[in-house]
Amino acid sequence: MNDPDQTRRTTSARCNGHCARCPRAAACPARQAAKGAPILLSGGSTGGSSRNADGIGFAVDVGSTTLAAGVYDLRTGALLARAGRANPQAAVSSDVIGRIAAAEKPNGLTNLQGLVSGALETLLADVCSSAGIPPTSLSDGVVTGNTVMLHILTGRSPSSLGRAPFHADWLAGCEETLLGHPIWLPPCIGAFVGADLVCALVAANFDREDPPALLCDIGTNAEVAVRAHRTIFATSTAAGPAFEGTGVRGSELLDAIASFLASGAISETGASAPGSLVLADGRTLDNADVRAVQMAKAAVAAGISVMLDEAGTCVDELSEIFLAGGFGCGLNPDSAAAIGMLPSAPAAKKTPIGNAALAGAATLLLHPQRRTAALQLARSTRLVELGGNSNFSDRFIDAMAFTPA
């Protein structure tokens, strides 16, 4: 009897990514998986591939907290496997400002670059193992991330990003050799609006001349983009660790706050009686948890409000609200609206699009001709700075109350 694991190992060991010339292609586990697993992009549509060559490529999202990668059949566009792991740079600092400071220390940049490069090599090995292929079969890839993460990954000093006027000397949008492979780095928009947002915009087809729409990628940093009047406006605001750092996480956290507001256990100001915030399973929220969410949701809500103003549109005109990121796409829009984090927009379709940065990177991997459009998208997007913006400060104060926007 044949040993399936032995067959898998033999096939994998001999894989060179040139499927058309491989006599074992019919038995290749990666090719078998490709037949029924097309990559799904925004809206559930099949992305396919416009690359008329056999091979296996990869897409990577270098997040501040999490690294995510997928490997794809370059001819069919099929997702062969996907995996994620924590960014080990978090041991140095949990946020990009701390990592900029760490990079300025002796050997700091080299250390940070080594941490993320080593983790990505392990991640790619893991995802290739899941697909039944060796890492040596990978041909090329697209690697996205925020501006600071891409600086560090490529060994470039991020110092200029950490001090006024917060100018990025380099905005990617180029080819490099990293992790032993040729890769394409999508363009960044500014110091704190990176290639990850550009990829999210690509995944959501935000460059179409459609009615006004809003995209929110919510995590430790929240990126907000508004499309209106044939122009895209984008910004970034610091949400902080509130959505990830408490004992109650993700959508459950917002659901709990919304429920306590409805019952009167939490007031509109965020005040609560000691010991009153007890969940059904016995876990509790304390005042510090509530205040952290209050600050984070105010930053997101104020950012959205300012962006709508800048774009010359309003909530009632939004046709769609895209929710991206591990936290953003998992939240309950009704709870987010009830606490005043997301706008109450009954007419707008609320669309979760998952890790849109990774999906956009995969799109640019499988459709290289769209890279020119991504470069143009980054250049034409209007960057809105919230620092020192009096309108943002006023909206932030208003948004501190737990009331629907």
Image (spheres, rainbow, N blue to C red):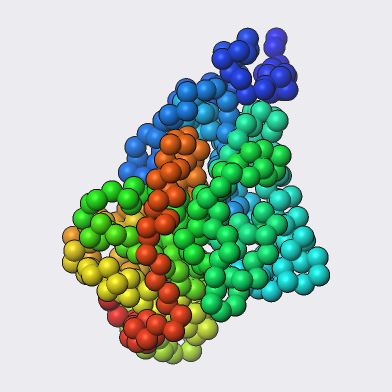
Is residue 396 visible in the rendered structure shown here? no
Using the image as rendered, state which of residue 350 and residue 108 is in the foreground: 108
Residue at point 67%, 21% (across, down): 15
Say above or below: 283 vs 47: below
- The x and y percentages for residue 29 are 59, 22
- The x and y percentages for residue 300 are 40, 73
Is residue 238 visible in the rendered structure shown here? yes
Q: Is residue 142 left or right of residue 360?
A: right
Residue at point 56%, 15% (across, down): 20
- The x and y percentages for residue 286 are 51, 82
Say above or below: 52 vs 94: above
| Residue at the right extreme of this rendering | 106
Q: Quadrant of residue 379?
A: bottom left
Using the image as rendered, state which of residue 285 and residue 200 is in the foreground: 200
Residue at point 34%, 47% (across, down): 205
Q: Please state, as top left, top right, bottom left or bottom right, where the N terminus lies in the image.
A: top right
Q: Please state, as top left, top right, bottom left or bottom right, where the C terminus lies in the image.
A: bottom left
- The x and y percentages for residue 7 are 69, 17
Using the image as rendered, state which of residue 241 and residue 143 is in the foreground: 143
Q: Quadrant of residue 26?
A: top right
Residue at point 36%, 77% (across, down): 302
